[in-house]
Amino acid sequence: MRPLPKLTPENEFFWTSGADGTLRFQYCEACGRYLHPPTVGCPGCGRPPEVRAVSGRATVAGVTVNHQPWLPDMEIPYVIAVVALEDDPLVRLTTLIVDAEPDTVAIGLPVAVRFEQHDDVWLPVFAPTGEPVAEDATFPEPVPAPPAPMVRTEKFESQVALTGIGMSEVGRRLGRPPLSLAIDACRAAVADAGLTMDDIDGLSTYPGGGAKDGGHSEGGIYPVAEALGIAPTWFCGTMETPGQSGAVVNAMLAVAAGLCRHVLCFRTVWETTSIAWGNRRNSGVDGARRVSGDMEWRLPYGAMSAGNWIALMASHYFHRYGATREQLGWIPVTARAGAAHNSYAIYKAPLTIDDYLGARMITTPFGLFDCDVPCDGSVALVVSAVDTAYDRPHPPVLVEAVGTQMAERMSWDQGTLLHEPMVDGPSAHLWQRTDLVPADVDVALLYDGFSFNALSWLEGLGFCGRGEGAAYVEGGHRIALGGELPLNPHGGQLSAGRLHGYGFLHEAVVQLRGHGGGRQVADAEVAVASTGGGHPGGTFLFTRG
């Protein structure tokens, strides 16, 4: 059944507003602005907002036609959209477009609210008004915070290094307990660093123990410490970090602060086995009938996957900059060429641009090969104090800079529509913490949960200008091995498998050690890596030690 929002004192006015056919939002009289989602106080002045009726008219600002059967009571295809309110275009709703053929819904389409009652909830959906599409429609963009300057000249990054990496078996549906995958990866990383478990005095992971049944965790710090026989001086397992790799930043900070010398970081996924064992839907969310928090604004509309949410932004980007699916397709096509030289990659068979364009549609503009590959596997790495790093079996990988800043709203519809959320902040922050520039980078390991994610990171990190990413990747020449900026030579998550960010860190070490074999970038000395994709993003700049 379709998930419905859980009514609370904060949101009940919104989800029951349709009882009299009127759409309502919070409004701050002092600041003259509408607020959404509902909040306890205006971010501008702190005053409690009032509830005010709006016109119910809006314009489609992002649109995706979903072809994936997420919910049995929602017939595919159906049209998910982000609509911008006529009363305030910076206030938007993720919703459904009804009473319209999917191929007639376009950005710039004027729409008006209707309500669908489900139990005690009135879902606002929108239908075309009959007015023509404004093909040249533009929409205001929120302004991100400026990059934060360094608070002191000494960088914690210079006090740490990556000294060991490990990876478990990786496969589509291994049927193994996730803890066994984590232990394999952890033991491999410690051995690769030339250490023993007695040397490990810190543990760090994302997202911790709370997400095990969803296929996103091995159980967290406690079972891993127990299985490895480690009594850490410092440990951390959490998901509210700058990207999944925020656990690695936490480890670096702990080492630089002198809390520990060698921190073992690990990340385990077992999504495909978790689904087979009946722990979760294929969408990545559980089967709860009532949802709250961030998910309540998307799941009731059948926007069950990050693919739907990011596709809405991709559609807006395509509209604004004239990008095409064929241009975007060179990201997965090039990734597959690299995966052919990666022993652990899930898919290695050649992929052509015609294969890409001919694949089944998932949620427009994304086809099958725009989506990463769910898998089972674990990755671990060792963060060490830099003064110990040169005693290890392999040359260390040094940390030049990290980017962690949250400069935008963490929202899928209230923030930017030009790129994946939480890209610009960590990107700008990264370059604030180094004298290096994008032209110094030899290899880019950029999060590609969907092909558009990688495009967003290319632009955010300054390898090309805003709106230039599609042309930058077209033909694949610039991003291929031997090109101007080799992108994800291991295959990324689009071909190697969704190791949820940590595969990029693993590959950064492989490349800077010169151990890439047939996918090795010649003379790689500087690597940039990013994680994110549905989370606040995080970035790293690594150099060869």
Image (tube, rainbow, N blue to C red):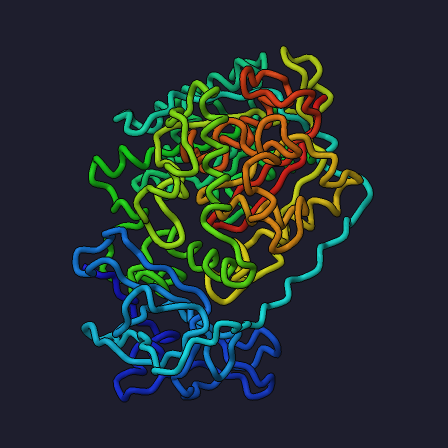
Placement of 60 over or under 55, stated as above or below: above
Placement of 378 over or under 244, stated as above or below: above
Number of on-image labels: 0
Q: Nearer the viewer, residue 218 or 407?
A: 407
Rendered image quadrant of residue 517: top right
**Residue drawn at x 35%, y 52% as measured from the top left:** 305
Q: Could you tell me which quadrant the C terminus lies in? A: top right
Instruction: Residue 258: tell me if it is visible.
Output: no
**Residue at the extreme front:** 354
**Residue at the extreme right:** 153
Q: Nearer the viewer, residue 124 or 331?
A: 331
Q: Could you tell me which quadrant the N terminus lies in? A: bottom left
Quick check: 430 left or right of 250? right
Q: Nearer the viewer, residue 38 or 318?
A: 318
Residue 83 location, x and y as percent? 42, 72
Residue 440 location, x and y as percent? 74, 34
Residue 428 location, x and y as percent? 69, 50
Placement of 392 over or under 38, stated as above or below: above
Quick check: 12 left or right of 418? left
Instruction: Residue 223: tell me if it is visible.
Output: yes
**Residue drawn at x 43%, y 18% as measured from the top left:** 343
Quick check: 25 left or right of 153? left
Residue 7 location, x and y as percent? 30, 71
Q: Nearer the viewer, residue 444 or 335?
A: 335
**Residue drawn at x 50%, y 49% as measured from the top left:** 240
Rendered image quadrant of residue 481: top right
Quick check: 469 left or right of 93? right
